[in-house]
Image: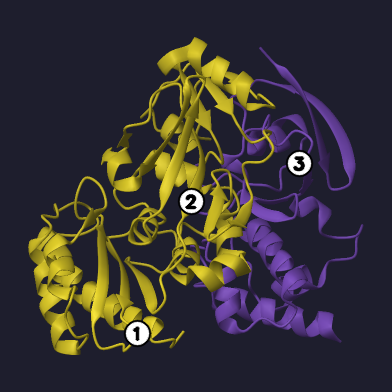
């Protein structure tokens, strides 16, 4: 059996108690949500918190709701719930799709969107679509609330700008623009239980004629310490007419926007080549979706 | 310090005092003597430890027993009704979907859960739903066929 080290465990039932605990414990206290990352890291000796604080019994953190034009997802929402949500499927199919690719069906029944974001692995599945959709996150502590875009939140592998006394409470996604569509593709050796070799999330927004790209987001993951915009690919696309040739050119640009490393999942040259392939494919699918194809 | 937790397992209520670092797998096997749930990898990568928790199949090796307090758990021991096998179990036995048997409890629970929510799954549905349960022996083909057979049996 793979054993867990010893730790203290708290299960606050309201946010104020949770904030106080975090304040007291400082960096010796770690939030546990679903536990599919935290418990693995504990078993493998990668983290050594003296205390785990579960926020699973605090109500109000796991709803998926439309509030005005925005969709608000509680940080404790299961990946499975996001994959199963009709609201998400209709409003942001790219997120629905990505959620269905996280881990395995069993993992998705425990993993939370908040955990996926805070654990901040370079290949995290929910981060690229959220970045492509312009999502913001809310962090709360005893001291107050702050809202950040993911680009400002993520620093590197497992590193974010979260303060030790903060809790990620919700994810807010602005309304999808008209004539916009996206796709997320994850490359793995297998179809399940995979950490992405690379992944790409693309979202295109067209003008009402459908002949010009008004906005483009191309997010690459697992090719850098954190998910990144393929900036030159995005610049190539914006203002241009969406054609297969344009997408090929953008895909080549995307290759130069990243410097992947070689590791056990793949070599750097292969990863770069696959960035080109997946960027091209996701752009074609995004165009289809933007034109109402999906 | 130990915490007192309550678990409803296969319809029976239990109260157990556990340390926070005990997983649900450990408590089921070592405190409740329910050995049907296995630990394969311990990190959520194989599904041998699958149990149904509050209606969802999960890797029990990644659930702290304290997190499961108050939950309804179904293990492999709860699938048969006395000596009467569930159609999924029958099909696994009859179609040769069991070799060493280590993945089998997890496979059966996941399959049973699938058929309860999707009584007419396609082959793709089955493979996708069971993609968190690994088998080193069978190559999966007979497992898929057993689930299809069970679906047919349940239908009739």
In primary-sequence order, the first of circles 1 and 2 is: 2
Q: Dot 2: within a 10 Å radius of its alpha carbon, few (fewer than 14), some, or many (20 or more) residues?
A: many
**Residue A197 percent coordinates (x, y):** 27, 60
Rendering coords of residue B121 (x, y %): 66, 81
Tell me the residue that label 3 is attached to.
Answer: B34
Inter-mark Cα distance, 3 to 1: 62 Å
Chain B: colour as depicted = purple
Label disc, if present, on residue A91 of the rendered structure: none
Chain of the residue under the numbered disc 1 shown in the image: A
Q: Is residue A6 visible in this depiction of the protein?
A: no
In space, the residues marked 2 and 3 are separated at their CA atoms by 43 Å
- Which SS class for mark 2? strand
Query: Residue A208's mark?
Result: 1
Q: Mark 2 against mark 3, which lies toward the viewer?
A: 2
Tag 3–tag 1 contact (CB < 8 Å): no
> What residue sits 14% from the left and 68% below the top?
A235
Q: Mark 2 sits on what residue? A: A172
Residues at marks 3 and 1, common chain? no
Give the colour in which the image draws chain A. yellow
Q: Residue at x 76, y 36 (%)?
A: B33
User: Where does residue A81 sit, x and y in percent of width and height?
Assistant: 61, 58
| Quarter assignment of residue A192 | bottom left
Q: Secondary structure at mark 3?
A: loop
């Amino acid at each position: 059996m793979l054993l867990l080290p010893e730790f203290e465990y708290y299960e606050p039932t309201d946010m104020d108690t949770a904030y106080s605990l975090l304040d007291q414990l400082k960096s010796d206290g770690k939030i546990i949500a679903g536990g599919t990352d935290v418990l693995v890291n504990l078993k493998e000796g990668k983290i050594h918190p003296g205390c785990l604080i579960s926020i699973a019994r605090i109500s109000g953190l796991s709803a998926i709701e439309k509030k005005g034009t925005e969709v608000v997802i509680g940080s404790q929402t299961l990946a499975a719930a996001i994959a199963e949500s009709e609201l998400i499927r209709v409003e942001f199919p790219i997120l629905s799709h990505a959620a269905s690719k996280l881990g395995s069906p069993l993992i998705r029944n425990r993993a939370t969107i908040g955990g996926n974001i805070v654990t901040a692995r370079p290949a995290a599945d929910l981060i690229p679509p959220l970045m492509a959709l312009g999502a913001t996150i809310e962090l709360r502590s005893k001291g107050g609330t702050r809202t950040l875009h993911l680009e400002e939140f993520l620093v590197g592998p497992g590193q974010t700008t979260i303060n030790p006394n903060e809790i990620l409470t919700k994810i807010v996604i602005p309304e999808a623009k008209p004539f916009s569509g996206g796709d997320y593709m994850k490359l793995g050796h297998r179809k399940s239980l995979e950490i992405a070799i690379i992944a790409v999330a693309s979202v295109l927004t067209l003008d009402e004629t459908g002949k010009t790209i008004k906005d483009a987001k191309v997010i690459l993951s697992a090719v850098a310490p954190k998910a990144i915009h393929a900036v030159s690919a995005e610049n190539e696309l914006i203002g241009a007419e969406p054609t297969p040739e344009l997408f090929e050119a953008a895909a080549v640009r995307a290759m130069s926007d990243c410097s992947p490393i070689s590791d056990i999942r793949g070599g750097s040259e292969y990863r770069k080549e696959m960035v080109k392939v997946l960027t091209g494919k996701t752009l074609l699918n995004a165009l289809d979706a933007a034109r109402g194809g999906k | 310090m130990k915490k007192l937790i309550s678990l409803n397992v296969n319809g029976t209520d239990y109260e157990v005092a556990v340390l926070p670092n005990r997983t649900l797998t450990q408590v089921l096997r070592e405190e409740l003597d329910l050995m049907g749930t296995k630990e394969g990898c311990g990190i959520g990568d194989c599904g041998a430890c699958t149990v149904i928790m509050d209606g969802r199949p999960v890797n029990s090796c990644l659930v702290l027993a304290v997190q499961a307090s108050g939950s309804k758990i179904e293990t492999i021991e709860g699938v048969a009704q006395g000596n009467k096998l569930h159609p999924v179990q029958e099909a696994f036995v009859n179609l040769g979907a069991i070799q060493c048997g280590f993945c089998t409890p997890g496979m059966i629970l996941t399959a049973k859960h699938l058929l309860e929510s999707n009584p007419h799954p396609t082959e793709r549905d089955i493979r996708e739903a069971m993609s968190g349960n690994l088998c080193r022996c069978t190559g999966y083909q007979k497992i898929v066929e057993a689930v299809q057979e069970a679906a047919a049996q349940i239908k009739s």
